Image (cartoon, rainbow, N blue to C red):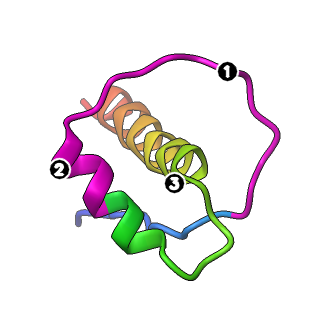
Amino acid sequence: MLFIAKFKIPENPPTVNKTVRFPSNIVEQVELASQGKDCTLSGFVIAAVRVALEELDKDASQP
């Protein structure tokens, strides 16, 4: 059975500044998805990375 975590657009969490380059089309898609919500680009990316890390942990723990 495949478990996929439900992605939730987060509120602004405390962050540390890092510079990351994204393709402009990805930034546009994220901005459209978070439009009208209390969410920054950084908050959206952080939530997506958390889900990806959880999936990596699950994959690493499977035989």
Of badges 1 and 3, nearer the viewer stands 1
Image height check: is 54 above or below 43?
Answer: above
On the rendered structure, is 34 left or right of 22?
Answer: right
Q: Nearer the viewer, residue 58 or 35?
A: 35
Give the percent coordinates (x, y) of residue 20. Answer: 42, 21
Q: Residues within 10 Å of mark 1 (few under 14, many from 20)?
A: few
Residue 13 horizontal side relative to residue 28, left or right = right
Q: Quadrant of the N terminus?
A: bottom left
Q: Separation of disc 3 and disc 2 at Cα?
A: 15 Å
> Which badge, 1 or 3, is on the more N-terminal residue?
1
Q: Which residues are magenta?
A: 11-29
Point out which mark residue 17 bears: 1
* On-image quarter of the C terminus: top left
Q: Which mark is residue 44?
A: 3
Label 1, label 2: how far apart the Cα atoms are: 22 Å
Amino acid identity at mark 2: Asn
Q: The residue under label 3 is which amino acid type?
A: Phe
Instruction: Describe the element under mark 3 as helix, strand or loop.
Output: helix
Q: Amino acid at mark 1?
A: Asn
Up-down relation of residue 59 to residue 16 (above or below): below
Tell me the distance, in whole angstroms, between the alpha carbons under discs 1 and 3. Answer: 15 Å
User: Secondary structure beneath disc 2?
Assistant: helix
Q: Is residue 63 magenta?
A: no
Q: Which is more N-terminal, label 2 or label 1? A: 1
Residue plotted at (60% across, 50% down): 43
The location of residue 9, given as percent across then percent down, is 55, 68
Q: Is residue 16 magenta?
A: yes
Snapshot quadrant of residue 10: bottom right
Task: Give residue 36's mark.
Answer: none
Q: Secondary structure at mark 1?
A: loop
Name the residue tied to disc 2.
Answer: 25
